[in-house]
Image (spheres, helix red, strand yellow):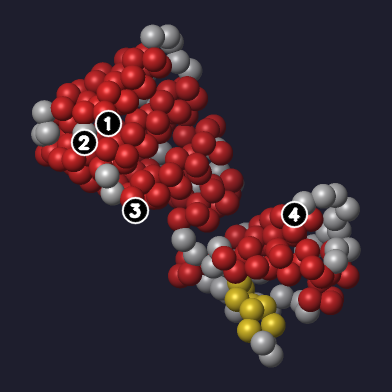
Amino acid sequence: MFGRFEQPRVAEKIARQILRSILDRTLRPGDRLPSERSLSSRLGVNRASLREAIKSLEQLGLVHTRQGDGTRVMDFMSHAGVELLQHLLPLAVAESPELLGDLQEVRVVLGREVARLAARRAEPEDLVELRRTCKERGERQLSPRELLKLDMEVFAGLARASHNRVVQLLVNSIRSAVALQPDLFAPLMPSPELVFAHHQALIERLAAQDAEGAAALTESFLSEMETRVGR
């Protein structure tokens, strides 16, 4: 289950290997990891690096260490947060294809409500920034990857315009996860013409403080992308 490491950033490499074993269910909730001495010997690493790796996995909600019981695997679906998404997405194609549909479904719900909030709360400078982003990108032909990046930039701009810090953090997490797996999401993008038209219409709804119009427009656009997933 575990291989040896001889390169730098040892704690990160240990954490990634254990994380992979948890996500692919080689290690299941309730399983106890080998003792610190045994595991450090098996991996060929020092115990300080191993402890650092275990600590990072605890912060992700993947394991829990208790004196007298050792370190046990947690049920990450009950304890982990959205930051785990970027680690789960690489499994989406071969092992958990429904995860891609789950994320798109969340984007529809979250995007609709973020657009609604942004229409109510956007300041003039928020609109200026959104218009600048769309204008700069719209001046040239974009590849599907570039379209995806633009759409996520607009999504982040909407989050900032909502002036809700929790919303911004959630959108940041989703944006980071998507950016790490562009080949999963770029094929879902509509044509550049449709993307540009949507962004321009959405900005107009925000400028008019049309919350329901902005929400409906965003829901329609993202729902169309969701249908391309093929759940």
Q: Is residue 21 above or below residue 120?
A: below
Dot label at residue 13: 4
Quadrant for the N terminus in the image? bottom right
Where does the image place residue 151, in percent across and percent down from the top left?
Answer: 38, 29
Identify residue for label 1: 126
Dot label at residue 56: none
Q: Residue at 59% of width from left, 46% of height from top?
A: 90
Residue 108 in view: no
Q: Is residue 117 above or below residue 26?
A: above
Q: Amino acid at mark 1?
A: Asp
Task: Give the mark toward the camera: 1 or 4.
Answer: 1
Q: Is residue 195 above or below residue 109?
A: above
Q: Earlier in the sequence, mark 2 or mark 4?
A: 4
Q: Residues within 10 Å of mark 3 (few under 14, many from 20)?
A: few
Identify residue for label 2: 122
Q: Earlier in the sequence, mark 1 or mark 4?
A: 4
Q: Residue at 40% of width from left, 16% of height from top?
A: 137
Q: Residue at 57% of width from left, 65% of height from top?
A: 59
> In the image shown, does 157 or 89 lie closer to the viewer?
157
Q: Amino acid at mark 4?
A: Lys
Question: Callout 2: helix, strand or loop?
Answer: loop
Question: Could you tell me how far apart the alpha carbons at marks 1 and 4 are, in whole angstroms?
Answer: 40 Å
Identify residue for label 3: 166
Question: Callout 1: helix, strand or loop?
Answer: helix
Where does the image place residue 105, in percent across and percent down from the top left?
Answer: 34, 47
Task: Give the mark toward the camera: 3 or 4.
Answer: 3
> In the image shown, does 26 or 16 lie closer to the viewer?
16
Q: Amino acid at mark 2?
A: Ala
Question: Could you tell me how far apart the alpha carbons at marks 2 and 4 are, in whole angstroms?
Answer: 43 Å
Where does the image place residue 143, in percent across and percent down from the top left?
Answer: 48, 18
Question: Could you tell me how far apart the alpha carbons at marks 3 and 4 are, in whole angstroms?
Answer: 30 Å
